């Protein structure tokens, strides 16, 4: 069984192995996509293949769309060269259900794959053709929150951004510069309307995308590299919009257990490809069944009727409330708590943590008792039901190969929104006292303990990548497991970090939580087993 258009002609073999095949003419959809592009997506990774491409597939099968998606990769070109194109842009979506069922779907909705390389004239010219097409309605993104950054973690402008600001739209080198160059081509072709829709998992994602595009417009105009009317174009919502969105679907790295299932089916070409940029890519993606996409409904050139396949379209305030509900209460804080303590306690699967009494009590109290009372109900999704699904279905799913180590990436960038917003709500409410919070400071203490890079058995481990890892580790560098200084000594060393609003969202000393964090941390460094003992003491 070969994952190509030719290979799919042996239809009965695929069906006999339980695969759901596209219920449309893949080649006809590809031809229509190239002739009349409607939807472009930047970011050819797992979340795109598991979510956006499947939405398009369902729309095509329902007769709601004739063309598919044009996918564009701008970070690692080899994903397109070594994975997409050799498989005729097909992939296999393996949905891992909590009841143990595995659903295998061949995704054929990707009509064209492109490389965002301004040095490759053929590739970049093709993208300009696509971007100037009258038919183009929306551009979506999953390039990660870092993808919108113009500066590094220290606030210094990235060299590629500086160079692109000066050089203009002709041949930009940065990811964002290339995107804005394509948008400028659409402007030059008659100021054609378009929706630029970030679907990255970050707060106010549309605002981040707009800020980046606007910065390029300002610099190019100031440097005489662009028509001054370009700024008016991106600011005119009858022509260009930057809708906000909230996306939620867990798509871990393709797992060996899933690969084994596909190999036993007889699927060929499954050997993973590791690119020169160390991206691990496979012709399949594994994902959970649960998914949410809530989008601000601002599309000046129209849009596909994606509400028919479960996308919720609403206003910006509602999107913001849904995103806050998820990120500050109902999912992300619970994930980070499990990530930090999972690494300390030696777990390698998130689902296994949900068999652990203390960790279950930790996230239940964190979600239901500390977070839920101050969350804003967005109306389109029920916060209590959302947490119920997270803690009873999604996270405990034993068939989802997700790890605390993956979720622990970039924790310094996550704490401010995931916990800081709840603390701020307690501070702002005269009927609530932030000092009553227990689980949030316990997670903060667990993160300090995590920064020591020694687990609860006293074994060294490698912390997950984090842009501020080295900077933050300096504050705990003098602590040793089994040696507990006085609270005053601990506080003197860690207080500058605890007062850092950029990391925690608030000054933990100012809101009265620093001493509690210090106390929990002191208990967790008492010796091997101290993390477990501290959890037992406070979460049971």
Image (cartoon, grey):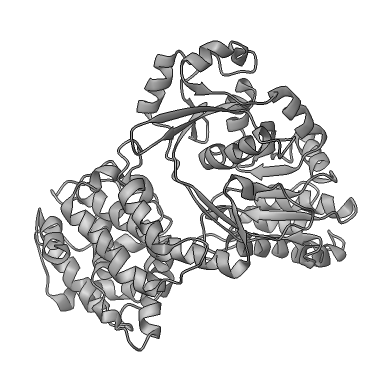
* Residue 448 in view: no
Question: Residue drawn at (87%, 65%), measured in percent from left and top?
Answer: 229
54, 527: nearer the viewer: 54
x and y percent of residue 338 in the render?
A: 29, 53
Q: Position of residue 281 (x, y in %)?
A: 50, 31
In the picture, which quadrant includes the C terminus?
A: bottom left
Q: Residue at x 82, y 44 (%)?
A: 135
The total number of labels drawn is: 0
Q: Residue furthest bottom?
A: 430
Query: Whole-percent x and y of residue 331?
Result: 39, 57
**16 lies above or below 344:** above
Q: Is residue 251 left or right of residue 169?
A: left
Is residue 82 shown left or right of residue 453? right
Front in this rendered view, residue 518 or 189: 189
Q: Give me the residue at 31% from left, 53% from top.
A: 391
Q: Is residue 101 left or right of residue 357?
A: right
Rendering quarter of residue 5 = top right
Q: Is residue 159 visible?
A: yes
Residue sitting nearer the eye, 385 or 481: 385
Residue 439 x, y percent position in the rendering: 25, 67
């Amino acid at each position: 069984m070969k994952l190509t258009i030719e290979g799919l002609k042996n239809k009965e073999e695929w069906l006999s192995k339980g695969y759901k095949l596209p219920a449309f003419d893949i080649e006809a959809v590809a031809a229509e996509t190239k002739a009349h592009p409607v939807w472009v997506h930047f970011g050819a990774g797992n979340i795109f293949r598991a979510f956006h491409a499947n939405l398009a597939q369902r729309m095509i099968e329902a007769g709601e769309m004739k063309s598919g998606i044009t996918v564009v990769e701008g970070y690692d070109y080899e994903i397109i060269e070594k994975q997409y194109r050799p498989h005729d842009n097909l992939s296999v979506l393996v949905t891992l259900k909590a009841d143990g069922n595995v659903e295998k779907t061949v995704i054929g909705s990707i009509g064209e794959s492109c490389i965002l390389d301004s040095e490759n004239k053929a590739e970049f010219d093709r993208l300009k053709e696509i971007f100037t097409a009258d038919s183009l309605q929306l551009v979506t993104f999953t390039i990660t929150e870092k993808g919108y950054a113009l500066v590094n973690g220290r606030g210094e402008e990235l060299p590629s951004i500086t160079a692109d600001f000066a050089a203009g739209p002709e041949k930009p080198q940065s990811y964002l510069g290339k995107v804005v160059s394509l948008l400028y081509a659409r402007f030059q072709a008659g100021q054609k309307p378009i929706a630029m829709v970030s679907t990255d998992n970050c707060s106010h994602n549309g605002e981040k995308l707009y800020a980046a595009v606007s910065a390029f417009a300002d610099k190019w105009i100031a440097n005489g590299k662009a028509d001054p009317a370009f700024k008016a174009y991106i600011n005119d919502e009858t022509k260009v919009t930057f809708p906000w969105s909230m996306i939620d679907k867990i798509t871990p790295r393709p797992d060996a257990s899933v690969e084994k299932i596909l190999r036993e089916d007889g699927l060929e070409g499954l050997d993973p490809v590791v690119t020169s940029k160390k991206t691990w890519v496979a012709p399949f993606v594994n994902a959970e069944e649960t998914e949410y996409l809530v989008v601000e409904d601002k599309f000046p050139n129209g849009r596909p009727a994606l509400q028919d396949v479960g996308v919720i379209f609403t206003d910006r305030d509602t999107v913001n409330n849904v995103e806050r509900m998820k990120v500050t209460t109902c999912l992300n804080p619970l994930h980070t708590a499990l990530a930090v303590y999972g690494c300390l306690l030696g777990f390698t699967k998130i689902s296994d943590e949900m068999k652990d009494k203390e960790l279950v009590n930790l996230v239940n109290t964190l979600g239901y008792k500390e977070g839920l009372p101050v969350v804003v109900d967005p109306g389109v999704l029920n916060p209590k039901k959302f947490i119920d699904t997270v803690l009873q279905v999604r996270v405990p799913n034993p068939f989802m190969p997700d790890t605390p180590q993956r979720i622990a990436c970039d924790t310094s960038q996550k704490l401010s929104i995931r916990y800081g917003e709840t603390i701020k709500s307690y501070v702002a409410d005269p009927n609530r006292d932030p000092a009553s919070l227990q689980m949030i400071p316990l997670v903060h203490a667990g993160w300090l303990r995590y920064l020591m890079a020694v687990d609860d058995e006293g074994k060294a481990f490698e912390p997950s990548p984090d842009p501020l890892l080295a900077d933050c580790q300096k504050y705990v560098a003098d602590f040793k497991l089994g040696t507990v200084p006085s609270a005053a000594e601990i506080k003197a060393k860690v207080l500058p970090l605890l007062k850092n609003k950029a990391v925690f969202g608030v000054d933990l000393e100012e809101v009265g939580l620093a001493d509690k964090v210090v106390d929990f941390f002191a208990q967790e460094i008492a010796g091997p087993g101290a993390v477990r003992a501290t959890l037992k003491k406070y979460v049971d």
